[in-house]
Amino acid sequence: MAQLSADLIQSLHFFLLHGFQILENQRATRDLNRVNQALEGNAASLSTFATDWSHWTDAHQFMEGKILISSQTTSKCLHL
């Protein structure tokens, strides 16, 4: 009888542990996907923000005379 109880406990432990491992893996995968989506969103926002600031930096440097526009660039702008 004691052996039967020990086997039953061991079997239940194995199946419960296996079930919890599957559940934990599913939740970890879900959470990692959410983190990945959040990081991708932050990267897209940062890219937009950096691009916006780079245009302002170029404009500021141009106004200070630090950037010279070549005649080739000017002719391209006139044909837009």
Image (cartoon, rainbow, N blue to C red):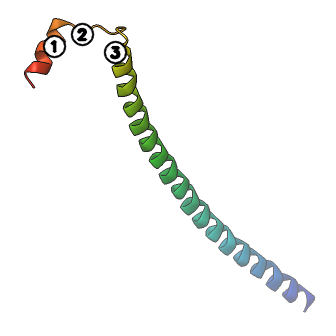
- Using the image as rendered, state which of residue 1 and residue 32 is in the foreground: 32
Mark 2 is surrounded, within 10 Å at the Cα level, by few (under 14), some (14 to 19) or many (20 or more) other residues, namely few
Give the residue furthest to the bottom. 1
Amino acid carrying label 3: it is Met
Vertical placement of 54 versus 46: above or below?
Answer: above
Give the residue displayed 72% in from the left and 77% down from the top. Answer: 16
Q: Residue at x 37, y 12 (%)?
A: 64
Q: Quadrant of residue 11?
A: bottom right
Q: Which residue is mark 3?
A: 63
Dot 1 or dot 3, earlier in sequence: 3
Residue 25 at what x, y percent from top left?
61, 63
Mark 3: secondary structure: helix
- How many neighbours does mark 3 have within 10 angstroms: few (below 14), some (14-19), or many (20 or more)? few
Q: Quadrant of the C terminus?
A: top left
Q: At numbered mark 1, what does the secondary structure look like: helix, strand or loop?
A: helix
- The label on residue 69 is 2
Left/right of residue 32 with respect to residue 55 in the rendered view: right
